[in-house]
Image (tube, helix red, strand yellow):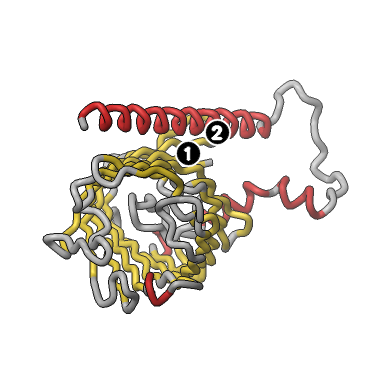
Amino acid sequence: MTSGCFIAGRAAARKVIFCLLGMTVLTAGATVARAADLPDSNAPPVFTNAAPTDPITDYFVHWYDRVHEAQATQPHWMTPIATVTPRLEEEIRFDTQFQQLGTGGQLTNIDGGKGLELIPTTMNEILINAPAYQERTIKSPAHGFADWNFLTIKQRILSAPEDKGNYIFSAFLGVQAPMLASPFTSKAWVITPTLAGGKGWGDFDIQATVGVPIPTSHESIIGTALVTNVAFQYHFLEYFWPELEFNDTYWFDGLQRAHRNQLFLTPGIVFGRFALGNGLKGIIGVGYQFALDPQPPVLTPALTPTYDHAVILTSRLAF
């Protein structure tokens, strides 16, 4: 038993190392890309009244103009650890969760379904996420990819920066694909419409989301849920963002968890935004998430809450 857990732990460690190496490569690539955009002091002068390029080239030439405009017209809060921010962000994100299950097992979630976040217009964001890789040990060992929340589109509806009201309201639409060969799949596509908003008062802000994951098949088994997240956040000494989050899920129906509710409390802190040069900013954070309800966990027909507690690590490269 001990040697098996040790080997599984080594395998999980190797996966974490490989993922961190991948993040390093992405960071280096982003740095080079931004450096390439900087003007060369030895280059000949560029005439600003030159004829405009074609629309596609012009769109990408002015990409960061739109990003800066989008971010200047919204609050400058930090993205919480678990709650999806209503703000528009442009960054690469990588999370890892170390979960303790109510069955006595342990599960490592590598990447947390995060990835690349882009601002293509002054009112929209596109999240292109990588599938999370999961490894369960001790009880019912298994490993594989979780269902893939590969795309989320944000539509910012209204917002104002700190000196003009300090608020924001947005709508999301997420799409999740089943990873049919995985032991962790629900075997269903899931569409998740979400409303998100936030309000700030000085250095304190509240960010919240309300979403409804809707399975397109097997709904009678999986059920339709109401997912609510509320994050209370404070900012001090430029780089410190402590927070407290409530993460709640209520299932309306479904054979697995009909009329059940799970509630997590997530205290944590995020550090950033650290200037790395060429417009890049580094962000790191850690949170401890634990279940408040139900306690003790309900084991059948489906484990509720889905885990008892977890340590969450987050790293981001904003650009």
Camera-side residue of 196 and 219: 219
| Residue located farthest toward the front when viewing the structure as drawn | 1
Task: Decide if residue 269 is in sight here.
Answer: no
Residue at 49% from the left image edge and 48% from the top image edge: 131
Residue at 55% from the left image edge and 52% from the top image edge: 128
Give percent across and percent down for residue 231: 29, 59
Residue at 44% from the left image edge and 45% from the top image edge: 144
Where residue 164 sits, quadrant-wise, is: bottom left
* Amino acid type, mark 1: Leu
> Relative to residue 203, is residue 186 drawn left or right?
right
In this rendering, is residue 210 above or below 63?
Answer: below
Residue at 40% from the left image edge and 47% from the top image edge: 112
What residue would you read off at disc 2? Answer: 26
Give percent across and percent down for residue 267: 21, 50
* Amino acid type, mark 2: Leu
Q: CA distance from mark 1 to mark 2?
A: 9 Å
Within 10 Å of the Cα at label 1, are there few (<14), some (14-19), or many (20+) other Cα atoms? many
Where residue 120 sits, quadrant-wise, is: bottom right
Query: Which mark, residue 66?
Result: none
Task: Decide if residue 169 is in sight here.
Answer: yes
Camera-side residue of 296 and 83: 296
Q: Are marks 1 and 2 in contact (CB under 8 Å)?
A: yes
The N terminus lies in quadrant: top left
> Relative to residue 277, is residue 211 drawn left or right?
left
